[in-house]
């Protein structure tokens, strides 16, 4: 595998988290998720973290401007210098454009966007099964379908954005964890 600055993109339940953990182990680079970035910035009491905390405490979505600021702080940390796996960021084309603007200042560029492709019917089945196993009452069919709509409207346009950048690689997300991992490794080569 040669690409080490990458995004994992796909709808809820596509297996991004599972595959990110495999890549962390294989590549020795950090997985950086939006939630982890926000919690870390809040815990470190950075100016951007304090602003994010205000939104989070009020139960509001953290605006793109704040999420981008938190991402910039996180990507500047020493462990991300040799590479990173972005999971859940960017979520919108606006965030992707901001990421494209910030990376040169950090001395790097995005190398690959791995798109995990899984049909919606399979995703709903996976998420309902996960909810049952983990006892998650928030993962019911109605909330899952709402998240799918949100993904299609806000995040799926990133696929075309990164195709336009020439770095998108669509990977079949069906099969065993190992089979999907092998397809991702081939797409990173």
Image: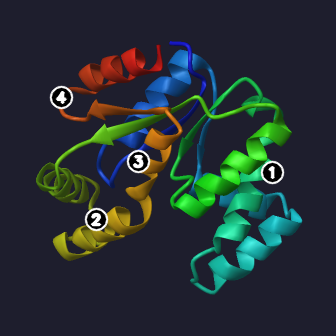
> Looking at the rendering, which quadrant does residue 86 occupy?
top right
Q: Are marks 4 and 3 in contact (CB under 8 Å)?
A: no
Q: CA distance from mark 3 to mark 1?
A: 25 Å
Q: Secondary structure at mark 4?
A: loop
In this rendering, the label closer to the viewer, 2 or 4: 2
The number of numbered badges drawn on the structure is: 4
In the visual, does 179 lie left or right of 170? left
Q: Position of residue 110 (x, y in %)?
A: 62, 34
How far apart in space, not on screen, are marks 4 and 1 (Cα)?
36 Å
Q: Earlier in the sequence, mark 4 or mark 1?
A: 1
User: Do the CB atoms of the residues marked 2 and 4 lie less than 8 Å apart?
Assistant: no
Q: Of residues 38 and 152, which is closer to you in this image?
A: 152
Mark 2 crowdedness (10 Å alpha carbons): few <14, some 14-19, many ≥20: many
Q: Earlier in the sequence, mark 3 or mark 2?
A: 2
Q: In the rendered structure, which disc, 3 or 1, sits on the residue that comes first in sequence?
A: 1
Label 1: which residue?
73
- For residue 155, the mark is none
Dot 3, how many residues are within 10 Å of its Cα: few (below 14), some (14-19), or many (20+)?
many
Q: Residue 159 — which label?
A: 3
State yes or no: discs 4 and 1 in contact (Cβ < 8 Å).
Answer: no
Residue 148, disc: 2
Q: Where in the figure is residue 123, as x and y percent of width and height?
A: 20, 52
Q: Secondary structure at mark 1?
A: helix
């Amino acid at each position: 595998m040669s690409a080490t600055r990458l995004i994992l993109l796909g709808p809820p339940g596509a297996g991004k988290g599972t595959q990110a953990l495999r890549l962390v182990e294989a590549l020795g680079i950090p997985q950086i998720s939006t939630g982890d970035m926000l919690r870390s910035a809040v815990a470190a009491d950075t100016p951007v973290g304090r602003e994010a905390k205000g939104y989070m405490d009020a139960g509001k979505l953290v605006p793109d401007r704040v999420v981008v600021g938190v991402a910039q702080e996180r990507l500047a940390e020493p462990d991300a210098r040799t590479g990173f796996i972005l999971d859940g960021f960017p979520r919108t084309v606006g965030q992707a454009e901001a990421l494209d603007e910030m990376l040169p200042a950090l001395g790097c560029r995005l190398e690959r966007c791995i798109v995990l492709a899984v049909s919606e019917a399979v995703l709903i089945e996976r998420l309902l099964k996960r909810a049952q196993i983990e006892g998650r009452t928030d993962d019911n069919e109605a909330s899952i379908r709402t998240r799918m709509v949100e993904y299609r409207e806000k995040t799926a346009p990133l696929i075309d954005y990164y195709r336009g950048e020439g770095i998108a690689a669509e990977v079949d997300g069906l099969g065993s964890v190992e089979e999907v991992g092998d397809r991702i490794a081939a797409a990173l080569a």
